[in-house]
Amino acid sequence: MIKVGIPRALLYYQYYPMWKTFFEELGAEVVVSPLTTQAILSSGSSRVVADTCLPVKVFCGHVLALIGECDYIFIPAICSVKTKIYNCSKFLGLPDMTKAVIPESPPIFDIDIDINKGKRELYRAIYKLGRRFTWNPFKVRQAGIAAWQAHLKYRQLMSIHGLTPPQAIERISNKSEAKPEIPPSSPTQTQAAIAVVGHPYLLYDEHINHRLIHRLEKAHYKVLMPEMLTAEELKLATTRLVGRSYWTYEEEVVGAGGHYLESGVGGVIGIMAFGCGPDSLMMDMVHRRAARLRTTAFMSLTLEEHTAEAGVVTRLEAFLDMIQRRKRSQVEVCV
Amino acid sequence: MEAYLGIDVGSVTTKFAVLNESDELVTHVYLPTEGKPIDMVQQGLKQIKQQLPKGVDIRGVATTGSARYLAGVIMGADLVKNEITSHAVGALRYFPEGQTIIEIGGQDSKIIIIRDGIVTDFGMNTVCAAGTGSFLDHQALRLNMSIKEFSQRALDSTTPVRIAGRCTVFAESDMIHKQQMGHRIEDILYGLCQALVRNYLNNVGLGKDIQSPIIFQGGVAFNQGIVKAIQEELGSEVIVPPHHEVMGAIGAALLVHEEMAHSHEGSKFKGFGISEIKYHTSSFECQACPSLCEIAQLSLNGQVLARWGGRCDLWERSPTS
Amino acid sequence: MRIGMPHMGNLYIPFKALFQRLNIDFVIPPLNNQRTLSLGVRHSPEGMCIPFKLTLGNLIEATELGADTLLMPAGSGICRLGYYAKTQEQILHDLGYNIAMVSVGVSQRKLFGLLEMIKRLSNNAPWSKIISAFRFGLAKLNAMDRIERAVQKIRPVERIKGTANKLFAKAIKAIDQADDYNTLKKVQINCIDQLNQVTKVSKAQPLVVGIIGEFYVLLEPFSNLDVESELGKLGVEVRRTTFVSEWTKFSLFLNPLGMNEKDRIHKAALPYLKRDIGGDGWESVGEKVLHATEYDGLIHLAPFTCMPEIVAQNIMPSTKENIPVLTILCDEQIAKPGMLTRLEAFVDLLEHRRRAQSNSLRREHGSLSGH
């Protein structure tokens, strides 16, 4: 059986169930790299020039971790999933860049996803990928349909049931349909809700964000994430803030940030990666909106390879203090 | 006399402040940390005890700064607070109308934006030490000059030299270059002050709504060259409060006073006797998962008091329990 | 309505000619200087590239001179540049400037987007008038680029360093002042004549270095600390494929015919990078492959934090085609002495390499003849 490796980084959090289903339907075995560790991050970062963004360094580390574990590595080049909205250079060049910096990597399966070239081009790309496993185009078609269905289910688990991507992935992989209810978030929540916005590969990689979400939950805050908003809400908020989207993954930053700032949550934390070009512009837009609204506390947190845990903790504590002291003073004023 | 003790253990210096019941500063101590936070906490405590009048009753202890958890365990702190909040609370005690606090410390620097006495925004230096005091220390050392002399001579500059480079190393090579070109040392010194302020404003202060009154505190506020450079760059008067170097400790003491007023329990302070106790620190690599976290532990007489450094809760213990 | 736009090299000259002939009210902000950069740096988000910072500085300075309608290139699928107009507009509004931002779609529609915008700005002037004004602007652009190519040849061999640059500056001024095609032609011929008469050092063959990388930093000497002149001083001849006139020519006449000036470059890049990644990343990789045997070395100019160029930088070392490359990251933090040190070391390396190659060639030749 062919083993296809999928790095647990970048778009893994967006599309893993879809990819996994596709390859498994075609009779392949799917191997995922382990959770990010310092060793994975360091090994990845040693391969690329220093100015490369953190998520790509993490990605390279995951590719390295898959060496010897699989026959092929799947690295799609996702140019565009909506008309005239493009992805950043790092995503476009990902397969080629990986090949260049990790020459010993198993052969790379790449696929061009570019909706601007038309649906026909997209289907052709999928067939081209599928033909590496089977000569039968119907089987590829079936795998494609199953994959899309898995993706829809995945999105649903997140937007309707409020699961985080790792929770949803686990739910799908366990195949246990037994309990469709999600455990209600801890009942001891006494504090306000804090929204955390940013790309899933930053929000759900606990190694690089120093367990930020866990820390918030431990301090009894209800944590809101971009995945909990509907596509419609994200789109509307993005349009209000910047007009038409420019980047493929703009809504989870600008849309979610804008939405939560306007919806009166306790505070909004924007998570961005050091060296990420789009983030620096998009988070600036959210920051400007926060400064103009002046109603909701906002903090942007830049994650970096050498970010010390203490730095994250101190900022988080200060941010929560700020919200609480602000609330207390408002109460006092009212009294 | 009832009193409240605040301790700010930073990466470069350790600060102590004792406030009385009416929040007036009774005494303070300022020591270099020298990479030995436990020793310095003990030593400072000894000095504080000597300086305090007889019959002072410590009713609350708070720790702040980057080693706040460690210091909290040693002291038996009633409150462990981050340094941003502490600095804001301290500064506002002296200047309630302040709108911006600039704090430049040894290895990190902060900006705190305040409106109507409430923190509305803050920033901290991100990845490098460019906008911090260590930048100046480094250059002063290179020029074989005390920070005091640095401060005075920088003020004599007539035509400051523009020093390029955000990072300390690049700035140093540019400074050497300017020296070799024969610029006056005073002009280079003030050029360094301007470079630090520029880096601070472009890094920590980026996108922040800086309004007067501006309060400038932290160890670097002793340097008149920096004060002048900030005023020039911002085009606005800057207030350096008294005791600015221990403001974090003062803020922590104020916070614990506030905290204890609402609390029904007495202080957990372990007493001045702890300055004599021999603490033991050690570390080990956790093998529980591939993360291989470096766990540091503090123990006393073979009994572990606290552990830090894990990426999960496995070794975590509440520092005060 | 008063137009303001950012600088890129001497591009303001053709635009000035164009606007003047169409009676469009406009201001030219001061040429890039330390203040421009400081203004841009102060008001830019963290992690922005030098083109963003400098153009923002230009726009602020244009606004100070009374501009209320600002032009910025935009479009989709082209690195962060497509987001600049949006962000800069917000920044200017937050600074309290009441301006309108006009995005010029140059990515897909190329020059036609520009022409349509000019039509609007000129209060719907007749196309004939627009085209005639445009042609004159284009003539100035072509003249400048022709002279610049000649200057690139003279800089490394002139006896008195700086002569070519002086003639170049004089010519630029004359081109700016020229009012008709005749004068323009005369200026061009004169300048090239004078350049050819410059006393030269008798050096056999100067090193040839290709300059590749990101469009803006290639064409804005202020952003690259005038690397071409500095190489000239070191006796190195500089070659560069990127010229605005070239881009214009293809965009207007040859692209519509299905010809692309970059096809050759893209084809060379294919084994290493299969697709356009925005900006000029694809071109950087392609040019390295293409020029590996043509030149002695390459200088790769990239703005610090530029996304496509970081991808290119990661890919370039893996190509089979081997040639020394010095990457210079352009940023406000870069200090000239540091850059000069690196340039000098690079030129030394190239000289040693050339000598070693000719020696081994001679040896090879010797051993062959020995047989």
Image: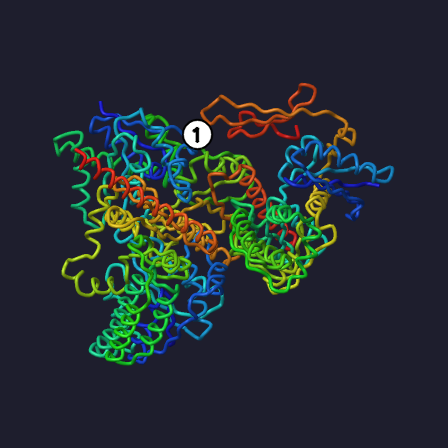
Residue C343 visible in the displayed image: yes
Residue C198 or residue B3, whichever sits in front? C198
> On what subunit does the disc labeled 1 rest?
A
Whether residue C209 appears in this view of the structure is: no
Mark 1 lies on a secondary structure that is helix
The vertical placement of C267 against C81, above or below, is above
Residue C330 x, y percent position in the rendering: 41, 54
Q: Indicate whether A226 appears above or below A18.
A: below
Q: How is the image coloured?
A: rainbow
Single out the residue that lies furthest toward the front: C370
Total count of labels: 1
Instruction: Please tell me which residue lies in front, C73 or C316.
Output: C316
Task: Find residue B112 and report its horizontal and vertical position in percent.
Answer: 60, 52
- Residue reaching furthest right? B54
Q: Which residue is mark 1?
A: A39
Question: Can you say which quadrant of the picture contains the C terminus of chain C?
Answer: top left
Q: Nearer the viewer, residue C323 or C17?
A: C323
For residue A46, side relative to residue C360 (left or right): right
The residue that appears at 20% across and 57% down in the rendered structure is C261
* Identity of the residue drawn at 28% across and 66% down: C145
Q: Which residue occupies the foreground of this view, B55 or B137?
A: B137
A78 relative position to C329: left or right: left
Question: Local crowd at mark 1 within 10 Å, few (<14), some, or many (≥20)?
Answer: some
Q: Is residue C352 above or below residue A142?
A: below
Q: Quadrant of the N terminus of chain C?
A: bottom left
Residue B149 position, x and y percent, is 70, 52
Determine which quarter of the picture holds residue A54: top left
Residue C356, image quadrant: top left
Amino acid type, residue under disc 1 in the picture: Ala
The residue under the point 30% across, 76% down is: C17
Q: Position of residue C33 (x, y in %)?
A: 46, 65
